[in-house]
Image (spheres, helix red, strand yellow):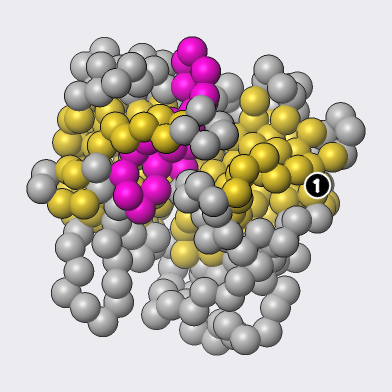
Amino acid sequence: MMKHFMAAEVAAPTSTLCGEAPLWDPVSRSIYWTDCTGAEFIQYRPASGVWQVLSRGIEIYGFRKRRGGGFVITNLSGVWLWDGRENLRPVVREIAGKPCQANDCTADSRGRLITATFYYCPGTDYELGLLFSVCPGGEVRLLDEGFHLANGIALSPDEQTLYVTDSAARRIYAYDYDVQSGQARNRRVLIQVPPDEGIPDGLVVDSEGCLWSAQWYGGCVAGYDPGGELLARLPLPAKQVSSVTFGGDTLTDLYITTGARSEPMPLMPPGYDPETGPFGGPLYRIPGMTPGLPAQEAEIRA
C-alpha cells in the first residue's frame, strides 16, 4: 500500500535563482543552502521561522561542513576551504589535467569529500565529467569517469553503496563503496528516469536506505526503494525542483530547494513550458517523513 505523505509547505519564502545543496546543521539547528546562480549562502532557522543571507559573492554548487570549522565547498573553479565569510583556500583546481568544474558533493564517515565534475554544453563536443574524492590530507583519488551532467551524490546508511546522479543521462548509478579504502567499484544503473519526467537532480538517502531525488522540470521529489523501485512522487508548486535534505531535530522534515530563473535545456521533457511558471525560488518542507541520516563532515586538512 502506498504510504500517505503530507503536502509540501513553504519554509522560507526566498526567491533563489537556483537554490541548491540544502544541509541540516544540528549545532545551529538550521538549514543552510546556496543560490549557485545568485551567489548567495542562506540560513533558515525552523524554530524562529527566520531566514537570512549569510554571504554574497561566493559561488557555491555543493558544500559540507568541515571538521574543525568552516566549510568545504565545490564550484565551477574547483574544491575550496571556506571560513564562511570571505576567506577561500583552494584544494583542487585541476583533475586529470582538466579544470575542476565541480558540482554536488557528499562526505563519508572518514572525512573524504566525494564530488564530480561536469562540462555539459549541448550542441558542442563537450568533455565527460569525472567522479573523485578528496582525502583528509588533500590527496585526490579518481573514482570513475564518463558523466554528462554529474549531480546529486549520496551514500547508503551502511556506506556500502555510493549513488551518483547523471542528470543528462537521466540516471542514478550505484557503486559498491568501501569506506575503509575509499574505493568505488561496479557501477550499474539503479534508476533510469523516463523521458517524460523531469531530470534527476539533488539526492538524499533516508535511514531505511530509500532514495529521494529532486526532479528539475518535474515539479516533484521522486522516492525510490533501495532496489530502485518507485515508491512515491511528492508534488511541489514549483517546476524546477533542485535538491533535498532531511532536517529538524528528529530529521523527519524533508527540505527542498527550487529555482526561480527558468533554465531551458534540451533535457526538458516533451510538452514542458519554459516560459510559464511557477518555476520556484522558495525553500519547501514536507514534515512527517522517515528519518534521514546526519550529514557527515569533511575533514580536509590541506
* SS class, disc 1: strand
Residue nearer the viewer, 267 or 16: 16
At x 21%, y 17%, the residue is 181
Which amino acid lies under the numbered mark 1 shown in the image of this protein?
A: Ala
Specify the quadrant of the image occupied by residue 142.
Answer: top left
Q: Which residue is mark 1?
A: 11
Quadrant in the picture for the C terminus? top left
Report the residue at 72% width, 22% height from top: 28
Please report the bounds of the magenta region as a residue range.
62-80
* Type of secondary structure dominating the magenta stretch: strand
- Magenta-colored stretch includes residue 126: no
Q: Could you tell me which residue is drawn at 29 percent across and 56 percent down?
A: 118
Q: Seen in the image, is 107 located left or right of residue 11?
A: left
In the displayed structure, would residue 148 be above or below residue 257? below
Q: Quadrant of the N terminus?
A: top right
Instruction: Report if residue 261 is visible in the image.
Output: yes
Image location (x, y in percent) of residue 282: 73, 57
Q: Is residue 85 left or right of residue 300?
A: right
Q: Is residue 68 magenta?
A: yes
